[in-house]
Amino acid sequence: MRASDRRFALALIAPATLFLVVFVAWPLARLVYDSFFQISPIAGGAREFIGLDNYAQIFASPTFQGAAGRTVAYTAIVITFEFVLGFAVALLFTALGRKSAIFRTIFLYPLMIAPVVAGLLWRFLLIDNLGIVNHVLHRVGLLDSPGDIGWLSDPSIVLWAVAIPDIWLTTSFMTLIIFAGLQNIPGDVLEAARLDGAAFPTVLVRIIIPLLRPVIAVALIVRGIDAAKAFDIILIQTGGGPQNASQTLSLLIHQTMVRFGDPGQASAMGTVYLLAMMIVAGLAVWFIWRPGAKS
């Protein structure tokens, strides 16, 4: 590459690099830096270096441990349902071919809805006694009264209830990614398998899924990180209740910062949160994608 071309390329990427440094790298560096201090919630207040004390406190906190466990459970619920449903629908669309064009368009509509709106909608549908879902179940005889199931007030099921809007909202994203990957699988490979007498389950497990490993890895990582940081949908529906049964790490960090006024401890939680997601994403790439591995 000539010097002039190199300078031109650097000039093109400079704005994006500056944006990443100012709005991504610097806030992340400040987050980690603040986690080693006890900081007054008042602007310009006292700041005292306390080393790893914030980390020791959060790891010893049952509240943090519970929120971390609920975050993992919530993410597992959302990703499992989205992947299974998204994969099934993508296979259906692929089988239908061009006939699925209208259905694909309709199926993608939830992606256009803001998470806050989805949270409000499903809160209206699931709210105790007044929710449409319970009234429908009561009408068809599955419930004795509309108040039999407390979707958003029963600690034992609330985490499943707040996962419903997320699943409904973004299953179409998973479908879109997997459907695009299915279009890139060579048709002659699938046809050869059929001519050899391979049943569909065999083709799915031995051919389709191995060829889709990079696509599946990307879809799971993107959606896993997005689900793990779920905030607005849960905040709108329950605010983390009842009895903190739907409180995830995002909500706990927000409450620690805003309600309890402890920026240092909130920064420590955020740092641990960030490192955990980076490790999980790396492991997902290694075990699911395994670049260079034989299919």
Image (cartoon, grey):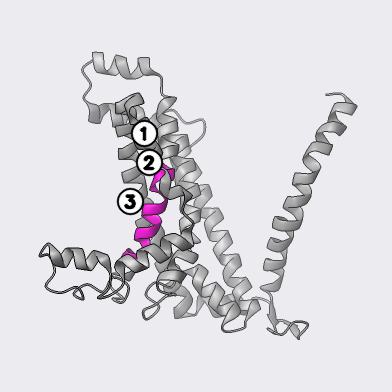
Could you classify mark 2 by the number of other residues whose Cα lies within 10 Å: few (under 14), some (14-19), or many (20 or more)? few
Q: Which residues are magenta?
A: 159-174
Q: Nearer the viewer, residue 207 or 236?
A: 236
Q: Residue at x 44, y 28 (%)?
A: 294
Whole-percent x, y for residue 124 in the image: 34, 68
Q: Are marks 2 and 3 in contact (CB under 8 Å)?
A: no
Q: Residue furthest right?
A: 4
| Label 2: element kind | helix
Q: Report the residue marked by disc 2.
A: 106
Q: Is residue 278 magenta?
A: no
Q: Report the residue marked by disc 1.
A: 102
> In the figure, is residue 285 to the left or right of 246?
right
**Amino acid type shown at disc 3:** Phe
Q: Residue at x 26, y 74 (%)?
A: 150
> In the figure, is residue 117 to the left or right of 92?
right
Whole-percent x, y for residue 278 in the image: 56, 54
Up/down of 276 relative to 174, above or below = below
In this view, the mark in front (3 or 1) = 1
